[in-house]
């Protein structure tokens, strides 16, 4: 992967994805070989929206590579609360760090940040836009369980506001995957995302119910209804809970079905699913560490190569 930043899944070719996932497998098999590989480097964690998994797994990944982390903290305790702009904020922080992980409520925020700094930027979620590092760990999880070709994947829930969905759907077009999208009409994939998927020639179908397709799925990727992105709370309450699965729902599924979820879940996957062999969402969350180690290693290696520096292998 010869990239300076990771902003969107659409920038990743199949070769790029496989290179990061191969490295993630190496990291998981032999983490000691990567310890202290980037000692002396600093990663800035800039989260303008809440996060548990992305923030902590990047922090953990960095530390396992010997990278120190600095955290902007909550928006309320930073100078963002005084009205500082995103571009001023990241231009300041680039002087403190060798790379920057950014989550922001506005779509396009990571693109804007990357235009204003010279250190690598990772988009850790921009509004309802993209979440490409989540996609890499999702693909890693799928590959470890099924491989990445000749698959049928169902993606269910909030397809309109779900940035993990937009990223994953785009990346899956690099592979031989049939994609089924299951949602209420009001939470369909945005027209622009559908257009881009069709442009790639991807096999996609849309449904309002899970039952007709469940049996043929290798992977069911469930997502949370994103309450915080609904302009109208009444509309949220109308659709919330409609796409809940439990162990009984999955009796009609293949024994090999893998159930994934980027988490956090609210009540769209009942706790009794956790006890089934289908549940893969905690494994998926844990994969965030080796995959983000592989990603940081790759981006810093690229940056160091551009500067003509040796990476401490
Ligand atoms: N999957 C994910 O992005 O989780 P967080 O919001 O906790 O980072």
Image (tube, rainbow, N blue to C red):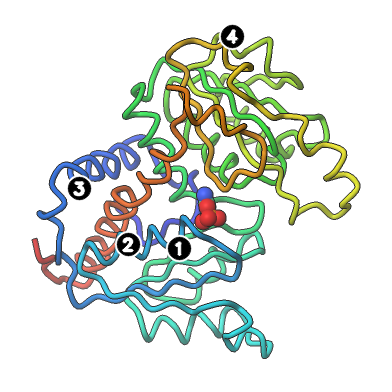
Nearer to us in this view, 232 or 89: 232
Q: How far, Cα to Cα, is label 3 from label 4? A: 37 Å
Disc 2: CA contacts within 10 A as few (<14), some (14-19) or many (>=20): many
Which residue is tagged 2? 60
Ligand 1 within 8 Å, label 1 CB:
yes
Mark 4, secondary structure of its residue? helix
Q: Are marks 3 and 2 in contact (CB under 8 Å)?
A: no
Counting residues from the N terminus, which is met first, the one under dot 1 or under dot 2?
1
In contact (CB < 8 Å): disc 1 and disc 3: no
Q: What residue is pinned by disc 4?
A: 252
Disc 3/disc 2 C-alpha distance (Å) = 13 Å
> Residue 193 at what x, y percent from top left?
65, 38
- Of the numbered discs 3 and 2, the one sitting upstream in the chain is 3
Q: Position of residue 136 (x, y in %)?
A: 40, 43
Q: Secondary structure at mark 3?
A: helix
Sequence-earlier tag: 3 or 4 = 3
Q: CA distance from mark 2 to mark 4?
A: 38 Å
Q: Are marks 2 and 4 in contact (CB under 8 Å)?
A: no
* Residue at the image position 37 percent from the left and 67 percent from the top: 120
Q: Which numbered mark, 3 or 4, is in the foreground of this view?
A: 4
Question: Which mark is drawn over residue 27?
Answer: 3
How far is mark 1 from mark 2, CA to CA? 9 Å
Give the labeled residue for mark 1: 55
Task: Give the vertical position of 243 relative to 163 (above or below).
Answer: above
Left or right placement of residue 216 versus residue 63 in this view: right
Q: Is residue 126 left or right of residue 122?
A: right
């Amino acid at each position: 992967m010869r990239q300076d930043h990771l902003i969107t899944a659409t920038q990743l070719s199949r070769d790029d994805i496989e290179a990061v996932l191969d490295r993630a497998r190496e990291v998981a098999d032999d983490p000691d070989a990567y310890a202290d590989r980037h000692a002396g480097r600093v990663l800035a964690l800039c989260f303008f929206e809440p996060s548990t998994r992305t923030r902590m797994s990047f922090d953990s990944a960095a530390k396992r590579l010997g990278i120190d982390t600095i955290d902007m903290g909550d928006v309320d305790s930073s100078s963002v609360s005084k009205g500082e702009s995103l571009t001023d904020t990241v231009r300041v922080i680039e002087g403190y760090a060798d790379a920057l992980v950014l989550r922001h409520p506005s779509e396009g925020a990571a693109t804007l940040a990357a235009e204003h700094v010279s250190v690598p930027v990772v988009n850790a979620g921009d509004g309802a836009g993209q979440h490409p590092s989540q996609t890499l760990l999702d693909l890693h999880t799928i590959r470890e369980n099924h491989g990445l070709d000749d698959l049928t994947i169902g993606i269910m829930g909030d397809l309109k506001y779900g940035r993990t969905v937009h990223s994953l759907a785009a990346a899956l077009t690099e592979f031989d995957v049939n994609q089924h999208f299951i949602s209420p009409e009001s939470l369909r994939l945005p027209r622009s995302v559908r257009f881009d998927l069709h442009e790639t020639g991807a096999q996609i179908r849309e449904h309002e119910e899970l039952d007709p397709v469940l049996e043929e799925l290798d992977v069911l990727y469930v997502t949370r209804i994103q309450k915080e992105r609904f302009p109208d709370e009444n509309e949220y309450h109308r659709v919330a809970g409609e796409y809940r699965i439990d162990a009984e729902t999955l009796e009609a599924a293949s024994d090999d079905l893998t159930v994934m979820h980027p988490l956090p879940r609210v009540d769209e996957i009942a706790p009794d699913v956790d006890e089934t062999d289908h549940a893969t969402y905690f494994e998926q969350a844990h994969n965030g560490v080796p995959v983000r180690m592989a990603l940081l290693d790759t981006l810093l290696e690229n940056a160091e190569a551009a500067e003509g520096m040796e990476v401490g292998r």
